[in-house]
Image (tube, grey):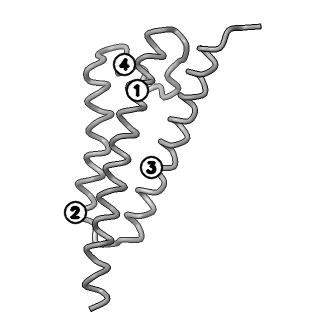
Amino acid sequence: METARTLPQSRSRLWNASFLLLCLSMIDAIFTDLGLRQGLIEEFNPLMRSIYEMNIPIFYLIKFCLPLALLFLVTKITHRLYLRFLLLSALLLYIIIVVYHICWIVMAALPLS
């Protein structure tokens, strides 16, 4: 019975982590777009830079679809440890990126002394 309780709870945590990843990805896309439009930052990823320069809606679509693909994998992968590693790595990366965005937003808002 203990397994029956933890399996749905485990799946729920994976879904929550996947949803958080989707939110962080969209925050990254919005902040990146704003920073690029204002000339405050440059896109570090050469592939995403070229996609952004070619078509901004496609840039947003990719930023939305990649976490959705991982969310889809949540339902298909049976190796929970592998899936948790993927999700944790992606979440950590996006948390770092969003903190970076917050830093440059604060720096851009502060007057130069």
Q: Which of the marked residues, 2 or 4, is nearer the chain's N terminus?
A: 4
Q: Helix, strand, or loop for circle 4? A: helix
The residue beneath circle 3 is 90
Q: Is residue 15 left or right of residue 38?
A: left
Quadrant of res 86: bottom left
The residue beneath circle 2 is 75
**Tag 1 and tag 4, C-beta contact below 8 Å:** yes
At 47% from the left and 25% from the top, the residue drawn is: 46
The residue beneath circle 4 is 52
Few, some or many residues within 10 Å of mark 4 (<14, 14–19, 20+): some
Q: Which amino acid, by three-letter code, is at mark 3?
A: Ala
Q: Position of residue 76 (x, y in %)?
A: 22, 64
The CA span between labels 1 and 4 is 6 Å
Few, some or many residues within 10 Å of mark 2 (<14, 14–19, 20+): few
Q: Position of residue 18 (x, y in %)?
A: 33, 53
Please tell me the numbered disc located at residue 36. none
The CA span between labels 2 and 4 is 30 Å
Mark 3 or 4: in front is 3
Quadrant of res 9: bottom left
At 27% from the left and 53% from the top, the residue drawn is: 71
Few, some or many residues within 10 Å of mark 1 (<14, 14–19, 20+): some
